[in-house]
């Protein structure tokens, strides 16, 4: 009698356990992830001459990661993500001049300011929520911000840039140096901490609801997902991240110019993300690495035409489909392995 | 005692076309009620007004006696109005486990949780497992939904709706496009849906309607044409004329 009961319960229990294991799997660390971050840490010790370039990569990576949160998870396209980056950069600069040169305060205020702008503009993305209107609305907001920064020269320094940005040592101990050693360590730690948080968020029920919105927002609404509220939440979070990335740029270069709100910021970050792949968090980081190395390498070979090659690579990549690149790579490796 | 779902004088025009014409319909508690009608009779427009996709020009929709006419889609779902779609509306990237888990966690108001993973929620896993079993999705539970066969996707469509623990479930042509081999599976599953869920079945397929429903309403040209038990509708001369005449098709 009990034996039959056990047998009847057995399959149910096993499906339940399997379901639980499947849900837990998304949070488990893959060895490649550990390798990635160990490599990043190692780069600090092993590549002391490249710290300035590596800092640029870390900042661009964080910026692209923030775009991935909205594009890769919620499916919200943007051509104006640079607005948050630029606002963060200016707020960090102004904080250091007018309030305090303590870097973490500047970072925090930059994140808050960008987050506020994100929360205020996000509802604009919900009206007539097509990709085209979203591209135009985000682009428009970025243009408004650019013109505001240009006009308010008394505050921003206008076309001359913000002069006199000085940043205190981090935690009162680690002074920013010309070789970018402190700057890189600082950027890398901020990137890692924010990455960990983002990873937690995208693997949570909230993150799953974003993937559902991206996959089918009609059905998401029909299972009770408050689509608009979720989009506003992730858009705000992404804006905070972009603002912090902008603040890192200000603090590590001790300079802010109109360039931080220029259109190419928004275009580059989209390009970087597409280069690295959307929807798995590492795309922005890998894309930033590839983009900056290409930029660095190509501009050494052909200073005039490096953008031509970047453009060509982008077109080829998008046409082949990045999903197929790893498959082509594996096939090539297998063929090589069989030959050897 | 109020009905599970009720419409009172529901009316909707598109320009000169009257798509829903003064429809007053009552879905009793625990009902197996079918809404049938030829193509273009206004079934989809009617369902869209029930679920909040379209706002009616006049009339009311009551869910368990509560007026939901002005509520949004998500609010209606949260009050217990579930639906499936005539054309699959699924999450291609998500597995059946994730899709059902999403619906369960949203029902528990835990969908906004950005910290605690579902991997620690045995209560949710238990509900997922129950639905996976009931719908026979065990062997495909870990696959991305887009890789499932059409019949399995049809079943998942209903499983997701049921995960929201609806009090009223609208099934919009659940058998549409299901190949013959997987059809019986689907019909059996429909027959085993919990009796405490009141169901409105919108359907074309008369075999399915006659085997599933205990009450039938017939919609023609946006208006309620006839209503009764299965036997009454089968014997109704007007309904036979509408279905055999064929001039309403198109």
Image (cartoon, coloured by chain):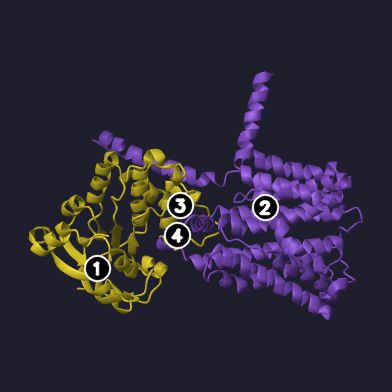
Chain colours: A purple, B yellow
Chain for numbered disc 3: B
Q: Is residue A194 visible?
A: no
Chain for numbered disc 4: A
Determine crowd level at label 2: few under 14, some 14-19, many 20+ residues with C-alpha closer than 10 A: many
Q: Are marks 4 and 1 in contact (CB under 8 Å)?
A: no
The residue that mark 4 highlights is: A220
Q: Label 1's element?
A: loop
Q: Answer yes or no: are tags 1 and 3 on the same subunit.
A: yes
Please provide percent x and percent y for residue A164.
Answer: 90, 71
Q: Nearer the viewer, residue A104 or B193?
A: B193
Q: Nearer the viewer, mark 2 or mark 1?
A: 2
Q: Label 3's element?
A: loop
Give the residue at x 22% y 50%.
B191
Q: Which numbered tag is attached to residue B217?
A: none
Please provide percent x and percent y for residue A296.
Answer: 83, 48
The residue that mark 3 highlights is: B91
Task: Tell me: B216 left or right of A137.
Answer: left
Find the distance from the CA under tag 1 to the CA under tag 3.
29 Å
Q: Are marks 3 and 4 in contact (CB under 8 Å)?
A: yes
The residue that mark 1 highlights is: B4
Give the residue at x 41% y 40%.
B140
């Amino acid at each position: 009698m009990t034996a039959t009961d056990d047998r009847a319960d057995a399959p149910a229990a096993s499906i339940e356990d399997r379901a639980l294991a499947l849900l837990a799997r998304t949070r488990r660390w893959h060895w490649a992830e550990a390798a990635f971050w160990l490599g990043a840490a190692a780069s600090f010790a092993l590549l002391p001459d490249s710290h300035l370039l590596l800092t640029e990569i870390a900042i661009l990576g964080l910026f692209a990661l923030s775009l991935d949160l909205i594009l890769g998870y919620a499916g919200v396209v943007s051509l104006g993500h640079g607005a948050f980056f630029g606002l963060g950069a200016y707020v960090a600069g102004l904080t250091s001049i007018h309030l305090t040169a303590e870097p973490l305060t500047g970072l925090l205020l930059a994140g808050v300011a960008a987050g506020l702008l994100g929360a205020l503009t996000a509802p604009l993305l919900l009206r007539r929520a097509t990709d085209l209107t979203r591209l135009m609305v985000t682009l428009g907001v970025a243009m408004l911000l650019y013109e505001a920064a240009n006009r308010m020269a008394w505050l921003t320094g206008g076309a001359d840039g913000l002069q006199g940005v000085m940043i205190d040592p981090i935690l009162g101990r680690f002074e920013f140096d010309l070789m970018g050693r402190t700057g890189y360590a600082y950027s890398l730690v901020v990137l890692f901490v924010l990455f960990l948080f983002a990873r937690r968020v995208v693997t949570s029920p909230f993150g799953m609801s974003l993937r559902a919105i991206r996959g089918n927002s009609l059905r998401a609404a029909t299972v009770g997902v408050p689509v608009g509220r979720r989009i506003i939440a992730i858009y705000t979070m992404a804006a905070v991240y972009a603002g912090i990335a902008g603040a890192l740029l200000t603090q590590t270069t001790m300079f802010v110019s109109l360039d931080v709100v220029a259109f190419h910021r928004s275009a580059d970050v989209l390009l970087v993300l597409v280069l690295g792949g959307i929807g798995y968090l590492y795309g922005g980081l890998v894309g930033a690495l590839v983009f900056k190395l290409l930029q660095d390498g190509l501009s050494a070979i052909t200073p005039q035409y490096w953008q031509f090659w970047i453009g060509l690579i982008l077109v080829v990549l998008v046409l082949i489909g990045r999903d197929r690149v790893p498959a082509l790579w594996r096939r090539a490796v297998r063929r090589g392995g069989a030959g050897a | 005692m109020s009905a599970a779902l009720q419409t009172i004088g529901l009316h909707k025009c598109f320009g000169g076309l009257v798509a829903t014409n003064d429809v007053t319909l009552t879905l009793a508690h625990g009902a197996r009620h079918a809404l049938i009608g030829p193509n273009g009779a206004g079934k989809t427009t009617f369902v869209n007004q029930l679920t909040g996709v379209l706002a009616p020009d006049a009339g009311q929709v009551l869910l368990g006696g509560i007026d939901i006419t002005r509520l949004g889609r998500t609010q209606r779902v949260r009050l217990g109005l579930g639906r499936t779609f005539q054309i699959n509306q699924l999450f291609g990237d998500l597995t059946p486990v994730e899709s059902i888990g999403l619906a369960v966690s949203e029902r528990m108001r835990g969908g906004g949780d950005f910290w605690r993973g579902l991997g620690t929620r045995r209560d949710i896993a238990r509900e997922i497992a129950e639905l996976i079993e009931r719908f026979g999705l065990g062997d495909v539970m870990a696959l991305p939904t887009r890789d499932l066969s059409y019949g399995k996707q049809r079943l998942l469509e209903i499983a997701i709706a049921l995960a929201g623990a609806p009090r009223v479930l609208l099934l919009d042509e659940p058998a549409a496009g299901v190949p013959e081999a997987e059809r019986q599976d689907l019909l059996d599953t429909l027959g085993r849906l919990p009796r405490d869920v009141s169901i409105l079945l919108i359907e074309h397929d008369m075999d399915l309607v006659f085997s599933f429903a205990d009450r039938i309403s017939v919609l023609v040209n946006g208006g309620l044409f006839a209503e009764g038990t299965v036997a009454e509708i089968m014997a109704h001369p007007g309904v036979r004329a509408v279905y055999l005449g064929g001039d309403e098709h198109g």
